[in-house]
Image (tube, coloured by chain):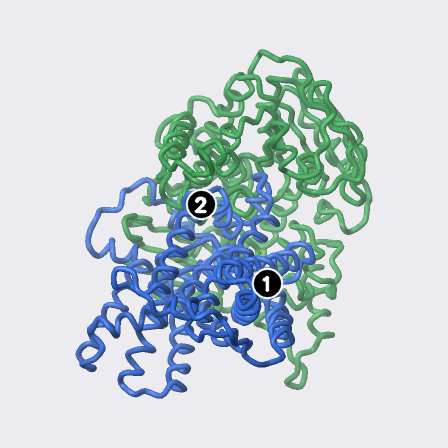
Chain colours: A green, B blue
Amino acid sequence: MTSPPASEMTGGERAQPSAVVSLSHIAKTYPGVRALRDVSLDLRRGEVHALIGENGAGKSTLIRVLSGDVQPDAGSVSIDGTPVVLASPLDARKRGIVTIFQELMIVPELSVAENIFLGNEPLAFGLYSRRETEQRTREVLRTLVRDSGIRPGQRAAELSTAQKQLVEIARALVFRASVSVRDEPTAALSEGEAVSLRRLILRLRSEGVAILFVSHRLGEVMEIADRITVLRGGEHIATLDAASISNTDELIGLMVGRPMTELFPPRNENIGEVVLRAEGLSRAGAFEDVSFTVRSGEVVGFAGLVGAGRTEAMRGLFGAEKLDSGRIFKGSVELNIRSPRDAIAAGIAYLPEDRKDQGLVLSMSGTENIGMVSLGDYCAAGVLSWRSLRNTAARAAQQLQFRGQLGAPASNASGGNQQKLVIAKWTLAGADILIFDEPTRGIDVGAKAEVYRLIHRLAGEGAAIIVVSSEIPELLNICHRIYTMSGGRVRDEIEQPDFSERRILAGAFAAHMGMGSAQPTEIGL
Amino acid sequence: MRVSDNPGRVVPELDERFTPVSFLRRHSREIGLPLIVLLMVVVFSISSDVFLSAPNFRNIGVSAAALAAVSFGQTFAILTAGLDLSVGSIVALVSIVGALVMRSHGIPAGILAALATGAAVGLVNGIVITRFKVFPFIATLAMMSVVSGLALSLSGGVAVTGVPTAFGDLAYQRILEIPVPVIMAAAVLVVAFLVLRYTRLGRRIFAVGGNEEAARLSGIEVGRIKLAAYMMSGICAAVGSIILTARVASGQPSLGATLPLESVAAVVLGGISLFGGRGSIIGVAFGVLFISILSNGLNLLNVPSYTQMMLIGAALILAVALDQGFGGGRAGRGH
């Protein structure tokens, strides 16, 4: 185990930064794919180092090498100048490298304290001591934030995503990590939560920990990173001092290898009649009296923090979850939606925030995922015509510029391509009201631009579109109108020329002024 | 916990070059078992002079037929990420009901009653699982006891005799030198294959087993699909029971006791993922062949049947272990 980082060192040692971990000339090939080629990277004590690149650039593989999960084919790893072999994640952890993956490793049924000390339980007279564990948990949490609202004895399942992040960070401190590696720590967080998390990362840095993190949020990268390494196609493109970079376009250029023309396409201009009208949608404990309208050709945004009730309300509208009350109209016809089936019959599509767990059947081919809803269209007398399914799916995929193999399992496709499979599925199902929940979460910048273009193309064809997103810039740039939700209620409605980030944030935080600990935003705010 | 399979994400950019090795690696699941079955045939042919003969192959066929029919049904249940442990009891109940009806109303009525009984038990399984939300493991384990008790009380615990002789002869007749039970099992295979591949129900079974939530959000009525899968399992078990009942020419309340284990073994050996949504029924056919040829060959080599039981159990464990290892442990998420 490496020696605990001494926090006094950070100030003085800054001038001569020492590499805690060095990766040199790392190469890794998977069957048919060269994931990494000759990549070198070093992490210095007390620095925040961002790793950016498009999906498939090799970021995840590099992180897995560093976490001991994957053995490189060539190249070497050294810690404090001594070459080492990171044989397993446990081995890496023992050497002070703590990796926090995108999917948090929290055991929901254990208490917060037990989670933090998992594998490292304090003992009293050789026995597990609950008191000691909870006492030390309280201390660790207090060093991180003034009031986390977390009780050490609380079941981890009750925590918000942001609070779980906090627990992961506390664990890194307990392990006396010298290096903390984080794969897209803020991907699942809303803007407000991401702000608090960034504060925590800076806190770790001041403890002398070296932090490597992957993020698709370039604004965040610019804000907190000391150095930035760009990967593209498995190769090391550049490592830059963050201070030397003036704007995010520069980074995007390095990531994609060509200048980005435009991330956001022009908005569709032909807005028609109100197609969808929801009145007073409510479900106890989740959302209350949610009313809104969407016009044909219109892109309507729903802003708010994670937990504001946006996803729940949309799932209620779609029939995926029960509504206690509320009415839904399409045009002038009232809909009676009791299940997703009813919603689909009415032309409503819901594209879930979690593509892998809810949007796709990963074990099935792209073709079959595209035909999932409209399968009946390719059946004659009950017999499925694979040819007709394949042809239709291929045509739909081509229109959306799907790049990947339709015959291969959907799990093989990148995030952007997976999203295209989901979009193709719903366009073939004949949906004219599409609800996108976090449409660009976890997908890279190039694919984001494509998803925005597709959204506006669908709107241009007359579809009514709802976009639920936690990325405010995204909403500001693609929507015609934005509703803000907070604490399960709609707080504000803003028309396009009046868009302002400040006003959205005000709405998003409306319910959180001095509220209880269950609220995700409380951390560090 | 593992991170999602990121290396896979990169695949579309580079087409994998075709080499014999890469082909074998990608299709190890599909090719592995047939190769092992072939190897077994070669080994037994060398070690026993009776093994490689038409009568012995007919023997294997007849003894494999019932297991095959039951296993093809089990495939439907396991593809939905479920399990049907009641197949053995269904075979017993169907045997009693079929024999009773056949004795008084003739063979066609008996066969219809048999199939209807299988479907009915499957329906109850399905309702317990989808409506009452009981895990398939517990639901079908409990039904195993219920149905077995029903079979025993209907028959008073003794065999139902007086089955028409024409029915008993069915098990030993041949068409084009192929025993009728083999033809029946083959028919079940063809129907099951076609249903799974070319009907909405079949594809939806894969979707529900692969990702229930995604299927539900795509408007698929998950409950109905599962119900149908358990009914298919019940009906296939009934076919298996008809084959066995014909062979013993009487209704037997204790028939099929080993079938729950053997059918699950055949399905899993055949490469169907226990997590649902993955695998091919052709593989299951090879799984059945594996078990039947192993047991036949060991019989010929005078290996006691108790030893065979141990071997089949071990083969099941080995198959699952290999699957976990080769599949990189990402067979799926267990709910």
Disc ID at residue B7: none
Asked whether the viewer can see residue B21, the reply is yes
Q: Which residue is mark 2?
A: A51
Q: Amino acid at mark 2?
A: Leu
**Residue B247 point in image, percent of width and height:** 41, 73
User: Which one is in front, A282 or B294?
Assistant: B294
Residue annotated with mark 1: B136
Estimate the x, y position of residue B177 in percent, counting from the top left. 25, 64
SS under mark 2: strand
Q: Which residue is more in the foreground, A226 or A70? A: A70
On whether disc 1 and disc 2 are found on a single subunit, the reply is no
Give the side of residue B215 with respect to residue A502, left or right: left
Tell me residue B110's x, y (percent).
52, 62
Q: Position of residue B100 (x, y in %)?
A: 57, 69
Query: In the rendered image, which quarter is residue A432 located in?
Result: top right
Category of crowding for the residue at label 2, using alpha-carbon neighbours closer than 10 angstroms: few (below 14), some (14–19), many (at least 20): many
**Labelled pair 1, 2 in contact (Cβ < 8 Å):** no
Q: Is residue B152 left or right of residue A356?
A: right
